[in-house]
Image (spheres, coloured by chain):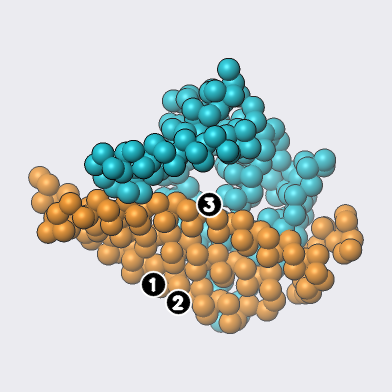
Chain colours: A cyan, B orange
Amino acid sequence: MSRILSFLATFLLLFVVFIIASASISPMDIVLGLITSVIVAAFSSTLLIKEAPTKVFNVIRWAWAIAYFFYYFLIIEPKCHWDVVKRILHPKMPIKPGIVRVPYDVKSDYTITAVACSITNTPGTVVVDVDEEGKKYYVHWIDVKATDPKVCHEMISKTFEKYLRRVFD
Amino acid sequence: MWEVVNQLFLYIGMALIVVGALCDLIGALGLLRFPNFFVRIHAATVGVIGGAVYPLFGLTLIAFACDFLGYWRWLFASGSFITAIIIMFTAPAGSHALARGSHRGRVPVEPKVCDFLEEDKGRS
């Protein structure tokens, strides 16, 4: 049962992406999309979704994902861009780089990856390594304000975790 | 009504593209000015997100507003939107792989305040 559901979820996501990318609902595009999505989903559904495929059909998770998308692109990213742009253009270049520990408190693989990608996508912080046993990221930070792991978690990854836990976990 | 919305989309899209060009320029300056590899990755991130993803979203809005393109404007809009989303998902994987590989390959982290990864795992 769960294998059928995960196949269906992968197939639906692929088909929607195909239709959006081809931007037409002519019969040929629909048939081509159906065939390619069925083939790709048959091969990759067990790799992509390992646990609880019902999460894909949960509307509240999608709403949180869209809210996170807008919050991320309208507020978080411009702030970090402005911060790094100021550092680049400043004549004295006020940087204090270093690699700090940032603990995380999420369970599923998708959430760990999404939080790491969010941290890397904001200028100023790059995830260098992940320690899955110790549950922490090693983050290269352009302006080390604190070396204590809890303060770093507060300043770098708290908002990402708050939203992404509701999407993936 | 639709005229106003189209004009709004057009101006927001153009503003996003100008912001993207500025971000690309400043990212290139940062790549030249910053002292070592790890700090330069941050300047490259400014070039990727500010210089590629935001202009592609702007292009999506402009394509929505261009009525004279007729049917083809949906193709432009969806193509640039999907490209923006894919760049957003794949760029962090690339910079993470570069950072991890160069830290394992003993690329110097100087100047630095602290390096807890080296303290915890060493540089093997």
Task: Tell me the residue that label 2 is attached to.
Answer: B25
Asked if disc 1 and disc 2 are in contact, CB closer than 8 Å, the reply is yes
Q: Residues within 10 Å of mark 2 (few under 14, many from 20)?
A: some
Q: Measure the C-alpha gap from mark 1 to mark 2.
A: 6 Å
Apparent side of residue A85 relative to residue A28 in the rendered image (left or right): right
Residue positioned most to the top? A1
Task: Tell me the residue that label 3 is attached to.
Answer: B89
Instruction: Indicate the amino acid at tag 1.
Output: Ala
Q: Chain of mark 3?
A: B
Helix, strand or loop for disc 1 = helix
- Where is residue B70, by image quadrant? bottom left
Q: Residue at 46% across / 57% down in the picture?
A: A78
Q: Can you tell which of label 1 and label 3 is closer to the viewer?
A: 3
Identify the mark at residue B21; answer none if there is no mark: 1
Helix, strand or loop for disc 2 = helix
Image location of residue B115, percent across then percent down? 81, 62
